[in-house]
Image (tube, helix red, strand yellow):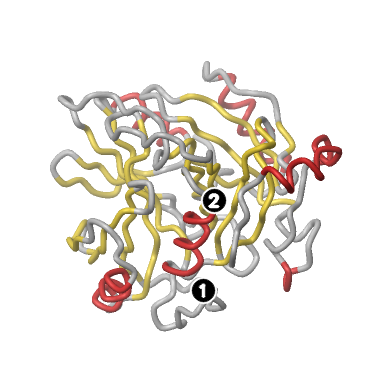
Amino acid sequence: MLHQIKGLHHVTSLASSAQENNAFFTNVLGLRRVKKTVNFDAPDVYHLYYGDEVGTPGTVMTYFPFPRAARGRRGVGEVGTTYFSIPKGTSAAWVERLKTFETPNIATDTRFGAARVLFDGPDGDRFALVESDDTRAPWTGNGVGADMAIRGFQGADIRLRDAGATAELLRFMGYQEVDKAGAVTRFAMPGGNGADVIDVETLHAVNPASQGAGSVHHIAFAVENRARQLEVREALKDTGWQVTPVIDRDYFWAIYFRTPGGVLFEVATNEPGFDRDEDTAHLGQALKLPSQHEHLRARLEKLLEPITD
């Protein structure tokens, strides 16, 4: 069993409008945009990152906004809902805030004893705000007070037709099964970074998901540094997983592999962080380009959708 993984690093999804996406995460949810860059493989598409003040691993939601992308179809073989952590007793305040912004499909429930507020993002992406005793410091620079601000991820749920092999994989990655209710099995990372929960939901009769705007592209797990990442990569390969070489993503190093249920997993390093090319006070303000795409700056600055903060 691995011991290097410490919970989630980030979750990356697809969107259809950079401006709408930015407005939702900064104005509605009150997160900070910590990086404005481009997709390494499609530099005419933004890669936007939102999180706490410095983009601490375990807080960062990221997006590839493909202009006018068709909406994805929900189903099995995907991350269905991404969970953010909020202080206890703040669900009602969040419901009122979300209503003010006409956020679609707001609902409330309780899962494993915790009150939740569920809602959709601009492209039908599904989120939950989960009440907890999370002590991580929130970002409050976008007008959401510290008394109710998002602390980071709590985790996510993975929707599968057959959960057996993925459950085995999570156990190998260091997660422990801690609870079960109906079709949902909860796994948690002991001593993690706060973004510690993965719920696996078994849905035998549901059709496979189809990716598009609103779909999670991949879910990333955090390791401290490159040495720990290489240990994870070798252990996964030795167990039979097809893992990519290490890829430099400027703000972290990444490896990827496809899980039995079809979900794309990444293992990302906490180093070097989002302040490697911007000081903390100005994170996310300037368009930052990977070195291999810097020669495209003039064209990209004309082509990319303007984002009004």
In the figure, 176 relative to 239: above or below? Answer: below
Foreground: disc 1 or disc 2? 2
Question: What is the number of the mark on residue 18?
Answer: 2
Q: Please tell me which residue is depicted at 29% across the width and 26% down the height of the picture.
A: 164
In the figure, 88 relative to 121: above or below? Answer: below
Question: What is the number of the mark on residue 138?
Answer: 1
Q: Please tell me which residue is depicted at 63% across the width and 32% down the height of the picture.
A: 255
In x, y percent, where is residue 95? 26, 71
Relative to residue 58, is residue 296 drawn left or right?
right
Q: Please tell me which residue is depicted at 40% across the width and 24% down the height of the picture.
A: 262
In x, y percent, where is residue 267? 58, 38
Residue 187 visible from this viewpoint: no
Residue 107 visible from this viewpoint: yes
Determine the image quadrant of residue 149. bottom left
The numbered mark, 1 or 2, whose residue comes first in the sequence reads 2
User: Is label 1 in a helix, a strand or a loop?
Assistant: loop
Tell me, yes or no, whether the two marked residues, 1 and 2, touch with CB atoms within 8 Å. Answer: no
Relative to residue 155, is residue 270 drawn left or right?
right
Determine the image quadrant of residue 161. top left
Residue type at tag 2: Ala
Q: Marks 1 and 2, Cα distance to the nearest angstrom?
A: 24 Å
In x, y percent, where is residue 90? 30, 77
In the figure, 250 relative to 274: above or below? Answer: above
Q: Quadrant of the C terminus?
A: bottom right
User: Is label 2 in a helix, a strand or a loop?
Assistant: helix
